[in-house]
Amino acid sequence: MNHIVTMKWLLARLYEPDLVIVDCRFALGKPESGRASYEESHIPRAVYLDLEKDLSSPITEHGGRHPLPNLEHLAKRLGQSGIQGSSRVVIYDDQGGAMASRLWWLLKYTGHEEAYVLDEGFTAWKNASYPVTNEQPIVIPVTYEVNLKPDKLVGVDEVREASLHGTKVLIDSREPRRYAGAEEPMDIKAGHIPGAVNYFWKGVLDDSGHWKNADDLREHFSNIPQDAEIIVYCGSGVTACPNVLALEAAGYSNVKLYAGSWSDWISYSENPVATKSE
């Protein structure tokens, strides 16, 4: 299944009426920089959705650093962005697809099939001398209907069971040093969920920053059986999403996101922590 579109593909369809383009640029630690970058320059017709204001809920005791957004709020923001059932949605960022993949996953989770991530991102688009603008589009609000796909999501209880019994493949999408507990710049505990294997999310990109094709992704994940039940997590449910997308592109059909991820897992004091490679 192809979830990635090229810059040339988008350029050829830039003004087709059913196409909605979403800018999701965002920098962790600099929460206003994404919106500022959008206002300075973006792909024509693109609207902006913010990781923390639009694609997450406020932080509480549990749920991680980027809890899933309230569905009513999300549907409202998607509708305000012009997204409806007949829309083809192309999402881009400048973070290797990490932020764009979060919205891609949310669209899939809420039942929208025609969602795609732009290969490479905004800087590559601009460097290719493709059109950019600082004009914000006039969007006619529409109604976004949620058709929830609950089988795409797991909570902490299912992850505990998978960790304890080894019944599912647990994938940790963070950098190897964070997985190993050698460093932890974001959360109060270091390590990983016992039983998890490490597939750093940037491994789905090639050396030039392009998404790998389906054959290369199958090779990348070749140690995982195609019929496996897979749960993917990261630090807060954002950079796990590129791995979810890549696994589906490689032909895996039973892939779920642990949205709360590591930051939710460690919010329960009774949950164990591992530091050795699995």
Image (cartoon, rainbow, N blue to C red):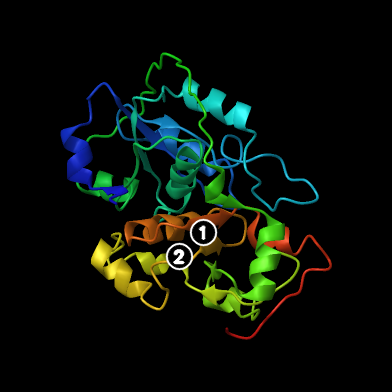
Residue 136 in the image: state x and y as whole percent.
39, 23
Residue 254 in the image: state x and y as whole percent.
46, 58
Q: What residue is pinned by disc 2?
A: 201
Judged from this view, the residue extending furthest toward the bottom is 276
Query: Judging from the image, what secondary structure is the residue with disc 2 in?
Result: helix
Q: What residue is pinned by disc 1?
A: 240
- Residue 204: quadrant of the picture: bottom left
Query: Judging from the image, what secondary structure is the residue with disc 1 in?
Result: helix
In the depicted structure, whether residue 5 falls above or below residue 181:
above
- Residue 231: quadrant of the picture: bottom right
Residue density around tag 2, few if under 14, some if 14–19, many if 20 or more, within 10 Å: many
Give the amino acid at mark 1.
Ala
In the depicted structure, whether residue 49 falls above or below residue 26:
above
Residue 167 in the image: state x and y as whole percent.
59, 71
Give the left or right position of residue 42, taking residue 5 as reference: right
Q: In which quarter of the image is the C terminus?
A: bottom right
Give the left or right position of residue 219, taking residue 22 as reference: left
Return the disc, 1 or 2, that comes first in the chain's sequence: 2
Badge number at residue 127: none
Nearer to the camera, 135 or 232: 232
- Badge 1 vs badge 2, beta-carbon distance below 8 Å: yes
Residue at point 40%, 35% (across, down): 22
Give the left or right position of residue 210, taking residue 169 as reference: left
Residue 89 in the image: state x and y as whole percent.
35, 34
Residue density around tag 1, few if under 14, some if 14–19, many if 20 or more, within 10 Å: many
Residue at point 58%, 85% (across, down): 277
Q: Can residue 78 be seen from the camera position used here?
A: yes
Residue at point 47%, 46% (across, down): 105
